[in-house]
Amino acid sequence: MDRTVVDSYRYLLIVMKAALGLNTFYSDKYFVVPSILDQYQTALRDPVFYMLQKRIIDLVCLFKLRLPSYTKEDLYFPGVKVDNIKVDKLVTYFDDYLMDMTNAVFLTEEEMKKTRSDMKFMVRKRRLNHQPFKVTLDILSDKSADCIVRIFLGPKKDHMNRLIDINMNRFNFIELDTFMYKLTNGRNTIVRNSYDMHNLVRDRMMTRDLMKKVESITDMRDLLVKDLRNYHTGFPTRLLLPKGFVGGMDCLMYVIVTPLRLVDNVDINLLDMNRKDIVRDFRSTVFLDKMPLGFPFDRRIDVGNFFTPNMKFTDVKIFHKKMTCDMKTRWNRWVLKDYNMVDRTPMDSDTYFVDTDLNMKMDRNVNLTDM
């Protein structure tokens, strides 16, 4: 292939961002002036950013459509059967999260001279969360072998409460967890906790707490490995489950167990969790297994050759728990607490008076009994 053609496709996203970001400065592949779409603080609020990302993903999906469907030999694991899938009750809810916004507050010259701020400015925000849950898998095997277990979650019905065709629905399945496991002869029971699933990160550490740790820590690598690991590449634990319904949202959980197809000439040392020179986890299933991301939903499904004993679908429901603290209660609790509305109500002493019982302005010439 011509080298010029390769360079044209390599920087496609950069060119699209520069063109749609209305970047008027001169830039080339060695010098790029960032536009609105190149700044994460502004790009994440721009719908064009997500349209560009979807366009790039569509190009990959178009390439996948040209590939043949997986055969039964690609999916089948002889001697292995997924016997049962047990999932705890899935419940989502919104909880209150405090964000430290002290660094965003404008300070006076006198306050800027202080070495430490004597004020904490916190912002309360509601974020989606879910209750911890476990997925229990019962796998029957007639031999001992290394395998890859993949767990997917996807919708079962559309907005019209109709079942969705598997080929139309395969892009909606999200890979919750993927891990390696060594099967033994007989029944194998695997229990996976929601917080232990791969590549998940907790809430980010606040800047104030981070500064305290930096001042007291002796080895910076310990901080990067223990507290900041995977923060640039991990997926938020809160968003592992979609927001459910009060009556339950019908979903499908899919589990497939495939043999480990080991990649040639791979460095196993990169999978060592105790290494301090690596601040992110390599996906062992991607690093060691030859099968691509999203397998087996990454290609068009041949329904006649798809279903094998080493895979299983199960119905699950995602419930949503309503919070008893609504917006009016939160307003009265956090904003109007100890707030005397009578003293702060503007009034004219000649024409208006403030009724302390009704908390409303009324005309003196109107008889209250006629209202």
Image: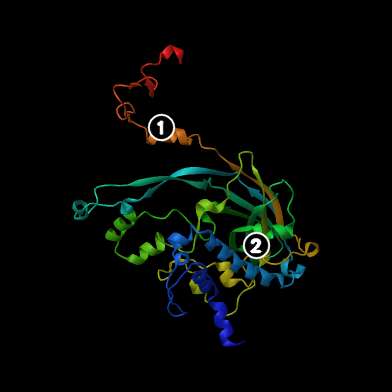
67 sits to left or right of 193: right
In the rendered view, would you say 91 is above or below 193? Answer: above
| Residue drawn at (42%, 74%) of the image | 25
| Residue placed under numbered mark 2 in the picture | 184
Residue 32, position in %: x, y? 44, 75
Q: Quadrant of residue 370?
A: top left
The residue at the far right in this view is: 304
Residue 19, position in %: x, y? 51, 71
What amino acid is found at the position of numbered circle 1 in the picture?
A: Asn
- How many other residues sit within 10 Å of disc 2, few (<14), some (14-19) or many (≥20)? some
| Residue drawn at (74%, 72%) of the image | 68
368 sits to left or right of 146: left
The total of numbered circles placed on residues is 2
Relative depth, front residue between 180 and 254: 254
| Residue placed under numbered mark 1 in the picture | 332
- How many other residues sit within 10 Å of disc 1, few (<14), some (14-19) or many (≥20)? few
- Dot placed on the residue nearer the N-terminal end, 2 or 1: 2
Answer yes or no: is residue 30 visible.
yes
In the rendered view, would you say 176 is above or below 365? Answer: below
Q: Which mark, by number, is residue 127?
A: none
Separation of marks 2 and 1 at Cα, in angstroms:
59 Å
| Residue drawn at (65%, 48%) of the image | 86
What amino acid is found at the position of numbered circle 2 in the picture?
A: Thr
